[in-house]
Image (cartoon, rainbow, N blue to C red):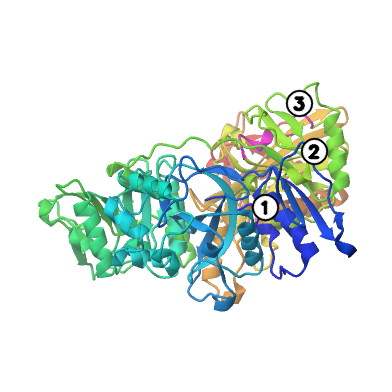
Amino acid sequence: MLPLTFSTYLWAGYQVVCQTIRRRHYKQILQSLFPTATVAVYQVKTGENLEQLDSVPHSSSTLEFEDDFVRLYKLRPVKEVNISSWTCYTSSPVTQDSRESSPENIYVVVETRHLVHKENKGTQPDLKVHVFSLGQPVAWKSSDHFDVLVSCNLSGLIQMVDAFGQNRLHLDEDLKVKGFATIQPSGLPQPVYDRHEEAQALAHGEATTVSKSFLTSRCPEYMLQTNPPSFSSKRQQALSDESRKKATKPPNILVYCGADERSFQTYASVKASLSLCVNTDVYIIYHLTHAEMLYAPWIENTALLLLSSCPDLLPAVEHKIDEFVFKHKGSLLSFDTSVESCFAHKVSDTTKDKSQLYTFQLDDQHTVTCLKGNSFYTKRQEGVSEILVPTEDSHSDNDMWKRALIMKINFHNGGVVIISQLVFERDPAHSAVDSSSFIALKSSNTARLAALKHVLTSMGMNVSLRANPDLTPCFLLSQKQDLRRKFLGSVHRKLNKESVLQSQHLNLTFLEKVDVSKQVSPNLLPVITADDSVDKRLLNGFAEKDYWRHLETTRLGQIVLYTDVITSTMHVFDGMLFSLPHGLSPVAIAGRQTGGRGRGGNMWLSPLGCAMFTFPLSFDIDSEMGRRVPFLQHLVSTAVVHGIRTLPGCQDLNLRLKWPNDIYYGKEMKLGGVIVTSTVMGSTVYSTIGCGVNVANSDPTICVNDIIQLSNRSKKSSGDAIPLLSPAGVIARTLTTLESLLAEFENYGHIPFCETYYKYWLHGGIQVSLNLETSEGRGQGEVIGLDEYGFLRVCKSSGETISVQPDGNSFDMLQNLVYCKRR
C-alpha cells in the first residue's frame, strides 16, 4: 500500500473563492506531494501588486512552475514505485523513454476504498469531478483497496486537490477517493490480456463482454470508446510489444470471502494469519473481490486461491474455480464452501452441532482447538486423495470409507486442492460468543497458525521466515517547544566531535533533517529533530493525534522519540540517562522491534499493533520511591491495567496483574510485561523502564482489542460498544496513570498503592512451593500480599510470614519455585 502523504492536510469546506487561504493550502499540499520542493506563495494586493508571503528561494534554485499566486522550485515526486505488478488500462503512457516527472508530466496514485452497503454515496452527480477528466489513466492495482495511477500536469493535479477538498472528486459509484500521492514510476504495467489481438481490441474500445463488464466498473464509458489523444503511436507499439509477452507478475495469494459487505473484514483476519505463515517477501496477498473473481484476469499469476466464509458460491464463481484448478493446474485451499463437492464427497453430519469446538493433535508440540463445521468428506475416484485430519469416528479398516475433516487431493494435471471443515485460516476467536470458547480458541492460537503453516507447506508454498524489516530513523515529537529546547540542550552537551551521542549498545546522531548519508543500523540511530522534517510516511505505527489526546502529564512522555522499526527501545536513552534535565522523562516508542526482550532474557515478539515503549525515571535515593525501587515494576504494570480499565465501558474487562511484572487476560494468557533496570549513582537512582503490551495485534496470541470485541459481542446495544484502542493511546494512558500513581506513592507510601494493585492481581490466597535454602528444604506457603519492598509475603504452613522473590525462572514465575528474600 502506498503511503498517502497529504490527506491529513485536506478538510471539508475547502473553497475556491478563498484565494489567499487556498494558496496557503496549496503550499501545504504541494510540499507534501513534492517533499523536496520549495514553494513561494503570494497574494494579490490593491493595484494588482504582489505581496510576498514567504521567503524567496536561493537564486540558484530552478523555477519549474509559476502563476499569479504560486511559484514552485525543484519539483520531485515522493518516491519511486515499480508498477510492473500493476495492470494497465486501455493504453499505457509510461514507457522506458517517458518516465521523468515534470510539471507537465506528473504521476499520481489515487487510492480509493469500497463503499460499504449502507454508506451514503454523497455528492450530486452534476457536481462530481471525475479523476480521468483531469488526468490520463495509466494502470490499476486491486487488493483490499483499489489504486489507480494517472498522468496529469500540475494544473490537473491542483484541480484534483481542489475537488478532493470539496468532496467532489469521483472515480466510480462504489468507490470513495481516500487520497493520493505523487510517484516516479518504474517498470511497465502488465496488459490485461496476453494475446496481441485482445490488447488491440481493448485499446480501441472493442473489449469482449466479460472484459468490458469489468473495466466499466473502473473506467468511465468515454475511456472505453476511444484512445486518449495524448497516446502516441510509439507508446501504442510499446504496449503491443509488451502484450505479446507472458505476464511476469510476482506470485499472488488471493483470498475470496464472498460478495457481502463483511468480506473485507474477513479478508483482513485471513491476511493477518497468512502474513505470519508465508514468506511475504515472496508472495503478495490480495483480496479477490466478487467482481474481480468473475471478471478480472486473476488466474494466470495466482500461486494459491483461498476461500473463506462463503459457504454458498454462485455457479459462475464455482465455474471460475473449477477452471483455475483443472485447466490452469491451480492450488486451492477451501474452508467449507459449496465448490468442495466438485473434488470430494461432502456429507452433512446431522449428528453434530454446527460450529462446535474441535481439538486435534497436529504434532508432538501442537494441540489445535478450533471451530468445526457440520460436514465431513470422503474420497472420490478422481485424483489422489489424502486424509490430513480424520473425524473421530473414522473407520480404520478401509481407507475408502474413512471420513475426513481436512482432505488433500492431487489431480493428475498438477492441480492441488485442500478442503477443510476446521476453521484455522483466520482467528476464530472473533466468532466466540462466550468467555470459555474465547479462552479455548485464543489459547490455541499459536497451534492454529502452526496448522495453517503445515497445510501451506504440504501445498508447496514458501513458508520460510521473511527478512526483518529495514530499520528506520527516529523522529522527535513534542507539543511543548520549551521542553523540546530543554531536552535538545541537555543532549547537545553530550555530543562528540562528530555530533554523535555515544553509548555501549546504541549511538544516536541528532539531525535537523533526514540525511541519506546517515544510514540506520543496529548501532546507529539518526534522530530527526526539526518539526517540519517529520515524514508522516515513517509514522505508520503511531497514531500521533491519539497519543496527544490521551496524554495528560506534566513531565512523562511530553518528548517522544518515535521510530517505525528499531532493534529495541531499551537502549535509546543509555547515552543520556545521567544528563537529562530534572523532572523530564522522554519516551521512546517503536512501531516494530526486531530484537525486543523480556524478563530473564526472554524474547518479546513485537509485531505491528503492539505498544512498545521505554522511558527513563530518576529518584532521590532517600525518597519513598528511591527506598522501594522494586515497586517500580508494579507501578508500571498497574498503570497499564488501571489506565485501560478506567476508560468508559472498560471497567469489566478481565485484565489482570501477574507478579512481578506481567499483564494478563484472566489467568490464562499473557498480554504484556514490564522490565526495569536501575543504577545508583551518588544520591540518585536512575531507572530505565521498558514495556510491551499487545493492543491491536490479534496474532500470534491475544491482544486488548480481542477482549474488547468479545465484550462488544455480548452487549445488547451497539451504542454501548467500546471503541477499539490504538497502541499510541494505550501508551499515553499508561504514562498519565503512572504519573498519578507515582505522586500518590511519594506522598502516602506503598500501602494505598497496594490497595489498587490488589484489585487486579491474580495471587491472593494461592499456594506456592518454597525453596527455603535452609535445613527445612522445600515447603508450601500461601501468598498473602506484598511486603514493604514489593516482594511477595507468604505464610508458611507453620504460620510464619516470610518475604520471597522469583527463582530466576525465565518462563513462568507461577511454576511455584521461589527463593527466600535474605536481608
What residue lies at 29% left-to-right and 59% top-to-bottom? 421
Instruction: Give the x, y percent position of residue 497.
Output: 81, 21
Given residues 283 and 360, the one toward you in this image is: 283
- Inspect the image, locate mark 1, and give the three-letter code of the amino acid beneath it: Ala
Residue 791, quarter of picture: top right
- Can you tell which mark lies on residue 500? 3
- Inspect the image, locate mark 3, and give the three-letter code of the amino acid beneath it: Val
How crowded pointer 1 is (Cα within 10 Å; few <14, some 14-19, many 20+) is rated as many
Instruction: Give the x, y percent position of residue 633.
Output: 71, 43
Quarter of the figure with the C terminus: top right
Tags 2 and 1 touching, CB below 8 Å: no
Instruction: Give the x, y percent position of residue 605.
Output: 54, 41
Q: From the viewer's perspective, is 7 left or right of 698?
A: right
Q: From the viewer's perspective, is 331 left or right of 782?
A: left
- Can you tell which mark lies on residue 728? 1
Q: Alpha carbon of mark 2 to alpha carbon of mark 1: how far? A: 43 Å
Against 310, residue 787 (above or below) is above
Could you tell which of marks 3 and 2 lies nearer the N-terminus? 2
| Count of picture labels | 3
What residue lies at 29% left-to-right and 57% top-to-bottom? 334
Could you tell which of marks 3 and 1 lies nearer the N-terminus? 3
Element assignment for label 2: loop
Q: What segment carries the magenta color?
A: 565-576
Q: Alpha carbon of mark 3 to alpha carbon of mark 2: how far? A: 33 Å
Comparing labels 2 and 1, the label whose residue is closer to the camera:
2
